[in-house]
Image: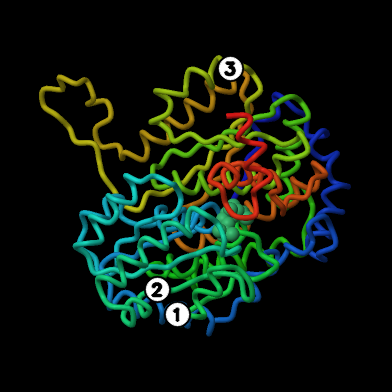
């Protein structure tokens, strides 16, 4: 059963159903190209049938490693950047206690490194690790990305000083390419437990490989249920490319109809702080997949109601090139009723007996109506509640819709050539061996 629903009724003041259904032909073709792995970037389409190809015994192996780590460590450091950490963080933060660092739990606390080059971040992290029993995973498909490689070098030294080389090796799990890359060579030499990022799955589509599954399992969440949800969405999608029946096709078609009508920015809006990293993951998925060849919808994110007090003004009255997609969760995990107050000095007794979720829902609805009045079309993705199965469905929903949407735009949604530009300059500025010519050239500019 599919639990994800997409409502586009509040976009229909801005575009017609016909404009959306006009994409049916290209959707049919793209759907087939994705399933048969014949379209652009087809060597990176392993994620399309990944959920149904994951065996239960493979999940058990990941779970066994997660349990082994749990016995040794109170803290688990996930080292990675971009697609090598955002998916795991999105799922973990959607599900975990929001003040996890203050909670007693039988699972390790998850912290992240290798997603910035801040000296203060690294030294603060070392302060924490000095006093904790910890283990790490280092995740890099290429095995050569500077940010995680730097963090790993520093944390590995710390770990070896703290536990000795042999025990440190027991506390490191590497997730990387099967054959190549500096991390693969290092992991083999040091004898680390290693998981493979499949050749045909790019970073931002890798959350359902060990890249996402290991940290999620260490955090104590049910990876069997997560994959089950993704399998349900994969199976539903296989036989159905009809825009009127398949929400992935509907999402891809509607956002492209809006794009063609001049709405070049999409804001993913959540009303739960737990979804902040799900939005970050979505931003990477869509931004890196579509933003190329001078095309693509700019993916932005806001967390409401927080950002109504910062970004709300712009969304209501700024340049009218925006549409919004609200991700709406129907049921909260926990309940809290607004109490009655005898004196009612704050004037809130009109809310007494209501749940916080009811107030939040009305904030969401009121905002959507205001934004539609202000010229911002609205799409609404709803999920009944945040749990592993529904998140698995949502992940596959976003991934497949992204593939379709990229094909509608006629770009290769599975490469990221533009990411290399900053790396080349940074290496040239730092004098990396092999970049001598670039170093000479860039020094004339700075
Ligand atoms: O989606 C992608 O391919 C990228 O965002 C990568 O995940 C990111 O650049 C990290 O790369 P790597 O896993 O090779 O270190």
Q: Which residue is mark 2?
A: 172
Q: Position of residue 313 (x, y in %)?
A: 48, 17
Horizontal arrangement in the rendering, residue 416 relative to residue 348 (left or right): right
Say few, some or many: other residues with alpha carbon within 10 Å of mark 3 (under 14 / 14 to 19 / 20 or more): some
Residue 393, can we see it? Answer: no
Marks 3 and 1: which is nearer the front?
A: 1
The quadrant in which residue 136 appears is bottom left
Q: Nearer the viewer, residue 356 or 290?
A: 290
Residue 190, labelled with which disc? 1
Q: Nearer the viewer, residue 66 or 436?
A: 436
Horizontal arrangement in the rendering, residue 435 relative to residue 327 (left or right): right
Horizontal arrangement in the rendering, residue 2 relative to residue 239 (left or right): left
Q: Position of residue 166 (x, y in %)?
A: 33, 82
Identify the residue at horizontal 22%, vertical 26% (top origin).
349
Q: Nearer the viewer, residue 178 or 429?
A: 429
Up-down relation of residue 106 to residue 351 (above or below)? below
């Amino acid at each position: 059963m599919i639990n994800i629903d997409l409502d586009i009724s509040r976009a229909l003041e801005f575009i017609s159903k016909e404009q959306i259904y006009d994409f049916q032909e290209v959707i049919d073709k793209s759907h087939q190209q994705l399933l048969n792995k014949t379209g652009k970037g087809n060597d990176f389409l392993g994620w399309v049938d990944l959920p149904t190809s994951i065996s239960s015994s493979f999940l058990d192996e990941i779970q066994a490693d997660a349990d082994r780590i749990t016995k040794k460590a109170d803290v688990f450091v996930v080292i990675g950047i971009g697609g090598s950490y955002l998916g795991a963080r999105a799922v973990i933060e959607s599900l975990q206690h929001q003040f996890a660092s203050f909670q007693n739990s039988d699972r390790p606390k998850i912290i992240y490194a290798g997603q910035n080059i801040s000296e203060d971040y690294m030294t603060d992290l070392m302060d924490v690790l000095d006093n904790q029993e910890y283990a790490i995973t280092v995740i890099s498909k290429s095995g050569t990305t500077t940010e995680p490689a730097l963090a790993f070098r520093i944390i590995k030294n710390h770990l070896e000083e703290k536990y000795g080389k042999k025990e440190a090796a027991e506390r490191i799990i590497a997730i990387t390419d099967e054959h190549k890359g500096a991390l693969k060579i290092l992991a083999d030499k040091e004898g680390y437990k290693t998981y493979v990022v499949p050749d045909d799955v790019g970073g931002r589509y890798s959350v359902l490989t060990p890249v996402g599954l290991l940290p999620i399992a260490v955090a104590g969440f049910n990876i069997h249920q997560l994959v089950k949800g993704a399998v349900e969405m994969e199976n539903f999608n296989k036989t159905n490319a009809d825009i009127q029946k398949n929400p992935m096709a509907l999402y891809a078609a509607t956002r492209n109809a809006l794009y063609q009508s001049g709405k070049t920015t999409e804001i993913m809006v959540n009303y739960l702080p737990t979804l902040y990293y799900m939005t970050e993951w979505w931003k990477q998925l869509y931004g890196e997949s579509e933003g190329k060849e001078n095309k693509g919808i700019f993916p932005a994110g806001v967390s409401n109601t927080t950002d109504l007090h910062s970004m709300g003004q712009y969304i209501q009255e700024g340049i009218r090139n925006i549409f919004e997609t609200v991700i709406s969760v129907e049921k909260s995990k926990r309940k809290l009723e607004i109490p009655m107050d005898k004196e009612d000095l704050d004037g809130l007794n009109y809310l007494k007996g209501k749940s916080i979720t009811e107030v939040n829902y009305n904030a969401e609805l009121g905002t959507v109506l205001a934004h539609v009045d202000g010229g911002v079309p609205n799409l609404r993705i709803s999920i009944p509640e945040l749990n592993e199965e529904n998140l698995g469905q949502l992940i596959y929903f976003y991934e497949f819709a992204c593939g379709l949407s990229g094909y509608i735009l006629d770009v290769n949604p599975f490469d990221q050539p533009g990411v290399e530009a900053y790396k080349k300059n940074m290496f040239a500025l730092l004098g990396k061996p092999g970049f001598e010519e670039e170093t000479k050239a860039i020094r004339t500019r700075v």
